[in-house]
Image (spheres, rainbow, N blue to C red):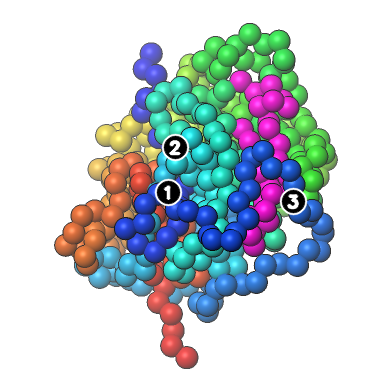
Amino acid sequence: MRPLRDFRCLCFLFSLGCGVGPENAAEAPSTPGAHPPSASSVATVVARPGDPLPPDLGTRSGGSDWPGFLGPSGNSVSPEKGLLAPWPKAGPPLVWQRRLGEGYGMPAISRGRLFVFDRVGDRARLTCCKSETGELLWTFAYPTAYQDLYGYSGGPRCSPVVDGERVYIYGVEGLLHCLRAEDGKLIWKVDTVADFHVRQNFFGVGSTPVIEGDLLIAQVGGSPPDDPAPNARFGPKGADSGIVAFDKYTGKVRYQVTDELASYASPVLATIDGQRWCFVLARGGLVGLRPATGKIEFRYPWRARILESVNASNPVVVGKRVFISETYGPGSALLEVQPGACKEIWTDKDKGIRDKSMRCHWNTPIYVDGYLYGCSGRHAEEAELRCLEWGSGTIRWRKRGLTRTSLLLVDRHFICLGEDGVLRLLKVDPNRYQEVSRVELRADGGRGEPLLNEPCWAAPILSHGLLYVRGADSLVCLELIPQTKP
């Protein structure tokens, strides 16, 4: 059995340090005079409903914030319009760039602030900077001793989550913090490993939480205190904390449900027939529950038979139907859900590996007008970008040779980032692969060194016309949608 050495980046996103150019090292200092909180700090501020929002530092007209994993609607779809197409030979104009510490998560952006979560040495760090310029505003750091079981990065996998005046970070070692967005002061923290007896997951914690009303809903996946398994490779048992809802203001547990262990897919929220749902593709399969109460409506087993396997692609919800996918075994399935049950519309589970409709690794596919677009394949050499018919799973087209890719949908185009650092602009077309532009981003207007080093595993994000892409050790900000002059 081949171990998970080829697993690529799951759905834990980006970690970065902010600044205004390549000369800034990853160890950016705290802003002089700023509050320097740490993991051992007691709460210095209290969060309450109705607290005022921090001032908006943004100056660009139009567009939207990107407050958490996969954007404002949680599906890697941007509502912005007017992108530059085709691109100049050197790609969209470079705005700023920054060296990063360790990690895999993308930033979150709110009210002109960009929040990035990375690791430098033995400290995990959240950096807040101006999203339009990279100018440093403040940093927050705490000690971490996480070591990956397979030798991958020791930095965070999850993206920050911004909710009004608060920002949340969920570290790879299991520490959950709530900070004030304006200055980084600590509001509350929870050690999920200590409180829920979590045994280290294959790649640590990597499922970004979501906000629902007054709740922060997270995958925790704790075990019984006396479980002898030291980590995921020894098959620990679950203990009624697969999904935990915390009070977003205080960090107190509001409910905890399921014996599932944690995966690398994030919870997905949806409204179906006027009722709120939360879908979690946990380690063992899909859980459908009511986010306000934690009431479980159904479970649908979906995992490869081998122990060293993970679920890492978010569910895709359209109407009453939910698409799930993984790459190690059964492939994909489309389900129709209702209170208390789900039924299969189509499934890959009885197909041979070459006949499966989609085998998503860490990327989350995107639905457009009855079709699903996404990267299929466990390894770079076999990966294909595919288009499927949503209702049947029939493959409309496939494109090899792109390596494993991640997508962002904006203005009827896909921004497609390959793990090799190649950035492509594709036209949405269910009939054929249409490449509009292709660029390997380089310094000095395309004449210098590459701006993105492998691996490039995090999906691109867009906020107020600015596109952010990351490689192994850098964040690059590009102007994708030009500003219109008044």
Q: Is residue 203 left or right of residue 174?
A: left
Identify the amino acid type marked 3. Thr
Q: Is residue 212 left or right of residue 145?
A: right
Q: Nearer the viewer, residue 475 or 30?
A: 30
* Contact, mark 1 vs mark 2 (Cβ under 8 Å): yes
- Classify 120 as above or below 79: above
Q: Which residue is mark 2?
A: 121
Q: Which residue is mark 1?
A: 27
Q: Residue at x 51, y 66 (%)?
A: 130
* Res 304 seen here: yes
Q: Nearer the viewer, residue 82 or 68?
A: 68
Q: Quadrant of the N terminus?
A: top left
**Residue 308 horizontal/vertical position (percent):** 47, 19
Extreme-bottom residue of the structure: 486
Q: Which residue is mark 3?
A: 44
**Residue 440 horizontal/vertical position (percent):** 24, 56
